[in-house]
């Protein structure tokens, strides 16, 4: 990892400003939710495990999104300037399609963002492969690395 990279594990949220890269490795059925204010160059990343559960837990989109918004507001970010990108929601193993955890994670993330009137401006979701996500707060770029599908920029 580079000096300015900060790893965000499952059930964690990080909000930073400036020359920082927030990283989530090996994202499968989890959903990574990225919120960003381009003008202030402040962003947050949440690595959510499941679609629902304890409403305040950062393992779920509802609690994670609310926590990112709360932390961004401390920096002076107004909610009407925030945009979102979402990544993940894969079906990683045969036989797990019926549980559809990945699909449900994406659906819940979209629903929660809509409740806050935060537009999703880009996404890389579903499929059957894992991804690693690198969110550059300085320019808002989200780089996605996948062993099977190479690199992608959102």
Image (cartoon, grey):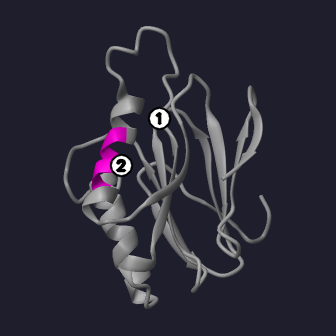
Residue at x 33%, y 14% (from the top left corner): 98
What residue would you read off at disc 1? 89
Q: Main secondary structure of the magenta part?
A: helix
In the depicted structure, whether residue 40 falls above or below residue 54: below
Residue at x 57%, y 86% (from the top left corner): 40
Q: Tell me the element at label 1.
A: loop
Residue projecting furthest to the top: 95
On the image, the x and y values in percent for residue 152 come to 73, 44
Residue projecting furthest to the bottom: 76
The image quarter containing residue 62 is bottom left
Crowd class of label 1 (few under 14; some 14 to 19; many from 20; radius 10 Å): many
- Horizontal relation, residue 95 to residue 115: left or right: right
The image quarter containing residue 138 is bottom right
Q: Tell me the element at label 2.
A: helix
On the image, the x and y values in percent for residue 150 come to 79, 35
Between 27 and 39, the residue placed more toward the observer is 39
Quadrant where the N terminus lies?
Answer: bottom right
Q: Is residue 76 visible?
A: yes
Q: Is residue 50 visible?
A: no
Between 118 and 71, the residue placed more toward the observer is 118
In the depicted structure, whether residue 10 falls above or below residue 116: above
Q: Which mark is residue 110?
A: 2
The residues colored magenta run 107-112
On the image, the x and y values in percent for residue 28 come to 53, 33
- Horizontal relation, residue 64 to residue 146: left or right: left
Between 140 and 146, the residue placed more toward the observer is 140
> Quick check: is 81 in the magenta stretch?
no
């Amino acid at each position: 990892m580079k000096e300015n990279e900060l790893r965000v594990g499952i059930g964690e949220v990080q909000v930073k400003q400036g020359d920082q890269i927030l990283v989530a490795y090996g994202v499968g059925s989890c959903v990574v939710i990225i919120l960003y204010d381009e003008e202030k160059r402040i962003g947050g990343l949440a690595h959510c495990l499941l679609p629902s559960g304890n409403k305040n837990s950062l393992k779920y989109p509802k609690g994670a999104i609310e926590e990112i918004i709360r932390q961004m507001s401390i920096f002076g970010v107004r909610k009407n300037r925030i945009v979102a990108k979402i990544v993940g929601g894969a079906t990683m193993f045969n036989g797990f399609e019926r549980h559809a955890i990945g699909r449900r994670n994406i659906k819940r993330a979209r629903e929660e963002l809509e409740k806050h009137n935060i537009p999703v401006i880009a996404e890389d979701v579903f499929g059957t492969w894992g991804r690693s996500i690198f969110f550059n707060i300085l320019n808002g770029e989200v780089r996605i690395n996948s062993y099977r599908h190479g690199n992608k920029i959102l």
